[in-house]
Image (spheres, rainbow, N blue to C red):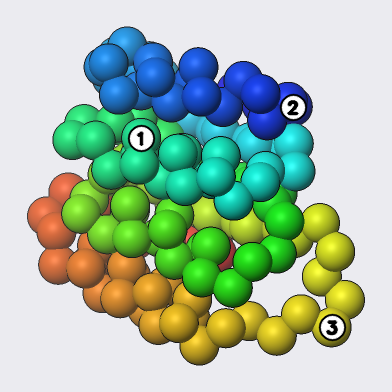
């Protein structure tokens, strides 16, 4: 599934929260619209739902650079959401001169450790 307009994110998130995506064989979710912070926070909240996107293997997001924003997404994945997830890519719209914040790096490390302890969670092959 490719989301090309950030205006569709709330509708997609509502479908996830209401459980409509649990049976969907969604292997890849590309959010290639440049996602504003509030939309990405909404997406992270939907990903935290128990059983959300159980078949998701690849998650790609293009977003505006905001320190701490990556943490929202990776925290959502820490509880074992999307247990088949193997690849996550986060692209910034304008990445020149961007220094990856320590808080975001720590959140990524915490997420990887948490998922490694959960039976049934695949390890990330690429990030």
Task: Measure the C-alpha gap from mark 3 to mark 1.
Answer: 31 Å
**Residues under labels 2 and 3: Cα distance?**
26 Å
Measuring from the top left, give residue 14's x and y in whole percent: 39, 19
Q: Residue furthest front?
A: 38
Displayed quadrant of residue 46: top left
Q: Residues within 10 Å of mark 2 (few under 14, many from 20)?
A: some
Q: Which label's residue is closer to the chain start, 2 or 3?
A: 2
Pointer 3 local density, CA inside 10 Å: few below 14, some 14–19, many at least 20: few
The residue that appears at 82% across and 70% down in the rendered structure is 95
Residues at marks 2 and 3 touching, judged by CB atoms closer than 8 Å: no
Q: Residues within 10 Å of mark 1 (few under 14, many from 20)?
A: many
Expressed as whole percent of the image width and height from the top left, the position of residue 85 reads 40, 47
Q: Which residue is mark 1?
A: 46
8 vs 27, left or right, is right
**83 up-or-down from 95: above or below:** above
- Quick check: marks 3 and 1 in contact, CB under 8 Å? no
Residue 102: % across, % down: 50, 88
Element at badge 1? helix
Q: Which mark is residue 28?
A: none
Mark number displayed over residue 4: 2
Report the number of numbered marks: 3
Q: Relative to 126, is 79 on the left or the right? A: left
First reached walking from the N terminus: tag 1 or tag 2:
2
| Front residue (pair 114, 74) | 74
Q: Quadrant of residue 107?
A: bottom left
Q: Residue 120 at what x, y percent from top left?
A: 17, 49
N-terminal of the pair, mark 3 or mark 1, is 1
The residue to which callout 3 is attached is 97
Is 3 on the left or on the right of 92, as rendered?
A: left
Q: Quadrant of the N terminus?
A: top right
Secondary element under disc 3, as helix, strand or loop, is loop
């Amino acid at each position: 599934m490719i989301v090309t307009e950030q205006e569709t994110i709330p509708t997609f998130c509502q479908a996830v929260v209401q459980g409509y995506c649990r049976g969907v064989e969604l292997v890849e979710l590309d959010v290639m619209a440049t996602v504003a912070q509030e939309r990405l926070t909404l997406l992270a909240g939907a990903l935290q739902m128990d059983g959300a996107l159980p078949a998701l293997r690849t998650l790609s997001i293009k977003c505006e650079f905001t320190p701490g924003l990556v943490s929202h997404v990776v925290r959502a994945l820490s509880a074992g959401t999307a247990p088949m997830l193997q690849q996550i890519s986060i692209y910034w719209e304008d990445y020149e001169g961007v220094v990856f914040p320590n808080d975001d790096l720590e959140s990524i490390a915490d997420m990887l450790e948490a998922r490694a302890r959960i039976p049934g969670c695949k390890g990330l092959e690429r990030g």
